[in-house]
Amino acid sequence: MQRRLPSKKILFGLLSALVAIALLVSVIPAMAAGAGDENTPIPGMGRVPNPTLVRMHNKLGSWFNDQEDLLREADGLSQNFQALIDVHQKAGKNVTILENGLATFEAEVAASREIHLVAGAAIFSTAGFKVNGDVRDRLVAGQQLLDGHASLKDAHFRLAQAIHDLRKTFTNWRHTRVTGIPWPTAIPTP
Amino acid sequence: MADCHTHALITAGNIVKKYASLFALLLVTAVLLSACSSEGTSGQAVNPKPPPNVRVQALPSATASPEPPQPEIAPTSSPQPTEQVYYYDPTPDPAALESEIEAVMDDIDKKLNSQDLLLKP
């Protein structure tokens, strides 16, 4: 009496099915944890719950909008400065200091705006957050917040530096106009 | 001789008898012709149709005719304003500009300093 063994085809099929099941069992929990488990730590942020991520996202969005207004205000300042240059140039005065200061300011504001736009692209991407503001993917959302924050801060510092330099130029020009002597750029050490 | 004469008369009479109708026709035709010719020489020819109402004018040419010269209108003097007109001087006041620049710089500085730079919940 001879026992019938299952054919090779059936054995191969069973084996493939087992492998597929094993793969699914190992991958699905990892995906679920990455997308929605609030206990999953985010690199650089720790165990931040999803509602906190949403709040941070809103805060960064608000910062972005405020900085957008500031950049627009800086453009207006640039126009006023140009008007001042035109007035004094028409009067035959030397406006070289003002012109150089304005050129530097405009370049710094343009650099700040570029970084600001990079921040906006990171913050308002829909990879980590849904359109309604909810978290879509915790890990991606966390990375978005980190990148957006870093860029916003960078743009902020550049704008602050631009304003500082323009103020310095303005003070220098006023001092020169009144006294005829340029404002000392460096304090001499005794 | 008399016979000859008689024979000629008889022959003429026979001919007249034979072509009497033809003669009569010729006679009537001659009378009508003479009547018509007398009327034609005495009267003028009349056209019974009324004269056509045709307006004779030049055909329009393919090229546009030049514009007739417009009569020049003598420039009239504008009415003199009775009230004094004030115009806006576009040149800004430098002092006002300087104070405005300072105010804007202060405002931007203030907003920049009030911004919370930390990423915290």
Image: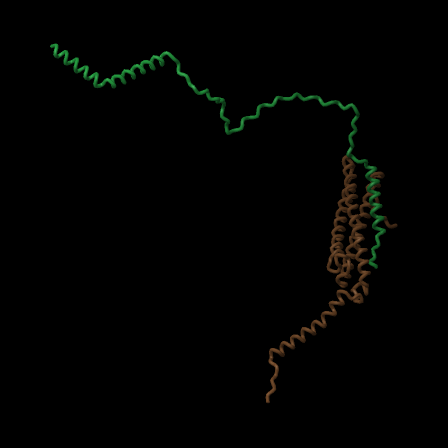
Q: Quadrant of the N terminus of chain B?
A: top left
Residue depicted at 65% across the width and 77% down the height: A14
User: Is residue A49 at all visible to an observer of this figure?
Assistant: yes
User: Is residue A171 at all visible to an observer of this figure?
Assistant: no
Residue depicted at 67% across the width and 22% down the height: B75
Q: Nearer the viewer, residue B14 or A90?
A: B14
Relative vertical location of residue A125 with respect to residue A21 in this rendering, above or below: above
Q: Position of residue B42 (x, y in %)?
A: 37, 11
Q: Quadrant of the C terminus of chain B?
A: bottom right
Specify whether B100 is left or right of B53: right
Residue depicted at 77% across the width and 57% down the height: A133
Q: Nearer the viewer, residue A150 or A126?
A: A126
Specify whether B60 is left or right of A118: left
Rendering quarter of residue A37: bottom right
Q: Nearer the viewer, residue A138 or A146?
A: A138
Relative vertical location of residue A114 with respect to residue B98 in this rendering, above or below: below
Residue depicted at 78% across the width and 34% down the height: B91
Name the residue furthest bottom.
A1
**Chain that the image shows in green:** B
Q: Position of residue A85 (x, y in %)?
A: 77, 39
**Chain that the image shows in brown:** A
Relative vertical location of residue B89 with respect to residue A10 in this rendering, above or below: above
Q: Position of residue A5 (x, y in %)?
A: 61, 83
Q: How many marks?
A: 0
Rendering quarter of residue B66: top right
Relative vertical location of residue A141 with respect to residue B105 in this rendering, above or below: below
